[in-house]
Amino acid sequence: MQPATADYPIRPVPFTAVRITGGFWQQRQAENLATTVPYAIRQCEDTGRLRNFDLAAETLRRRAAGETSFQNKPVTIYPFDDSDVYKVMEGIAYALHVRRDPALEARLDGWIAHVVAAQEPDGYLYTFRTMHPDSPVHEWIDEKRWLKDADLSHEIYNLGHLYEAGVAHFEATGKRTLLDACLKSAELLWRDFGDRRLRVAPGHQVIEMGLAKLHRVTGDARWIELAKIFLEARSPGGKAYSQQHLPVTQQTGAVGHAVRANYMYAGMADVAALTGDADYVAAIRKIWENVVEKKLSLTGGVGPIQHGEAYGEDYELPNACYNETCAAIALMLWNQRMFLFTGEARYLDVLERTAHNGFISGVSLSGDRFFYPNPLAYDGVAKNNHDHAGRAPWFGCACCPPNLMRTLAALTGWFYAVRDDSLYVNFYAPNEGEITVAGAKVRLTQTTDYPWSGAVRLILTPEKPAAFTLRLRIPGWVEGRPVPSDLYTYADAACPDWSLRIAGEPVTPALENGYAVLTRTWQPGDTVELELPMPVRTVRGHPTIEAVRHRLAFERGPVVYAFEDAAGQTDPETLAVSAATRATAQVQPDLLGGVVTLVLDDVTAPAAAGPATLIPYATWNNRGLAPMAVWLPKADG
Ligand code: FUB
Ligand code: ZN
């Protein structure tokens, strides 16, 4: 196979080259591998998601043997349930890529055999039709293949996740079993859509990113052409719900279903990177500005409207919002790609905010309870998590847990990136990376307590002295900008400066696109110390956001805080804070897996008869059901 050559100007350092060595993300990643991965495997098996493949395979087998009217009924609810299996497979593949585990690999190989057996001879793979071919077994499915895909059949959506899994499995193990099934399926898509006679704008995007990965791994230009065909099947009059209302290059704001939207913008970035289409980039830049200026929750979540799981109007950002976990994941995928185009740190400011707050809130500290919506306020009783109060063990529509699981498994792929002679340091977390920059192999060791402390120490060990530029991301929050827009601003005055030392000597580097730029010949063992001061900050929302007009929120570093009285005694609505409210950060190693809390010095929680204490938003509902709020009432209204 001939890998594709044109791609993003900046290349991410693969997650396999970066090993987390401690701290916040190690804890969450370790829990993911130890608990969430086996848990998601079991859920896919116990709920019948894998069994659907067997039922499809049985219909194929028995019909081929002459039982011409044999058919089965699915044992799960949704035609997109196949995609949960694919996402779990992708997550397992990432885990295997980091550490080979024969038992897990054998389990995955077993699953692949089930999937491959359900594929029709011409490459079609969609269990709900194959097991019940004579008539649609679900109202979302047409008599004929693909004809309801622009609506809700999810035939093409499932394939997007399949392709991502197939490429991940191939890269992790070198085995082609799943990749070959993907290619057989892609050949069918090419036969059915490649000549543009059948025009379908997929009703749920993700195929675009899947095809980009197939293109990268095979070098076959048809796969990126196909992604473009799907993107360009949009025209005026289509549904805004699935971003079909306008040609993609004429879209200027984020609308409709938030997961679909963000997957599409990320897919457009991939197509643009692989084909050089500048119009795509212009369109997604505009849409991104609309999101960060008017549609982003403080937690980095998006898609606040429950009906349609959708983006709202400009500044429509209620606190009892929806903000699906998958939408946060899709937003991170999109922002990472925007960075890869531009080298601008503002995209990673958004990614970092989402990662530490509205994304990781989706899974409990125990790794086996999940949020689908991630609201910024909760009354302590509502069954707002798909008919469940608090984090749920699983869902009928189970898109979020496997998505979380696959994302956490490969998260270190966001830490570093390289362009020519520049090495970008994007994420702060204890880790070791093996990176090649400007032809030199460099071992990079980071030690830090980030996100609880802003002190970061980097040791660079090139094989031999090497000249290159180190670009250290200076987060927007250090510079007094919680988000790259005026949607949220700090209400207090504190904005101490960051500082940098090399080999103990203070340096004042230039700041470029949000990065401190250090060009020199690096010697083995060179030490860089970055100090990002982390005072507690009070945040106010843009006055047009009605829900927060009389409220303030608290942050420290990239972490957004919330009030939750675990004893359920104090309703956040009874608190009163102001921009002058002082808060003390307290390291609490035994609380919620080890966090820093904020004690609001002069704000009393009436029922608790003591100062109000805030916890990191992402850790709420790990101590039972209680009211929670990020935005607290302002004393002076
Ligand atoms: O439609 C498939 C998935 O189910 C979507 O991504 C989620 O929002 C949920 O609707
Ligand atoms: Zn989801």
Image (cartoon, helix red, strand yellow):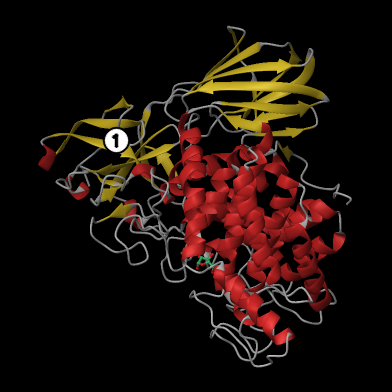
The image quarter containing residue 88 is bottom right
Q: Is residue 516 visible?
A: yes
Quarter residue 278 falls in: bottom right
Outermost residue on the front side: it is: 65
Question: Which residue appears at 32% of the width and 45% of the height?
Answer: 620
- Which residue is at a point 73% across and 53% down the rendered structure image? 167
On screen, residue 465 above or below 197: above
In this rendering, position of residue 561 left or right of residue 289? left
* Res 149 visible: no
Q: Position of residue 292 (x, y in %)?
A: 53, 50
Q: Secondary structure at mark 1?
A: loop
What type is the residue that disc 1 sits on? Ala
Viewer-nearest residue: 172 or 12? 172
Label 1: how many residues lie within 10 Å, few (<14), some (14-19) or many (20+)?
A: many
Dot 1 corresponds to which residue?
Answer: 579
In the rendered view, does 258 fall on the left or right side of 552? right
Residue 77 rendering spot, x and y as whole percentages: 48, 75
The number of callouts visible is 1
Q: Is residue 511 above or below residue 525?
A: below
Residue at the farthest right position: 2
Q: Residue at x 80, y 78 (%)?
A: 192
Q: Position of residue 86 (x, y in %)?
A: 61, 60
Looking at the image, residue 448 sits to the left or right of residue 467; the answer is left
Relative to 357, is 611 above or below?
Answer: above
Residue 197, given in percent of the width and then of the height, sits at 81, 82
Closer to us: 205 or 471: 205
Q: Quadrant of residue 306?
A: bottom left
Nearer-the-camera pick, 125 or 443: 125
* 547 in relation to 23, above or below: below
In front: 134, or 410?
A: 134
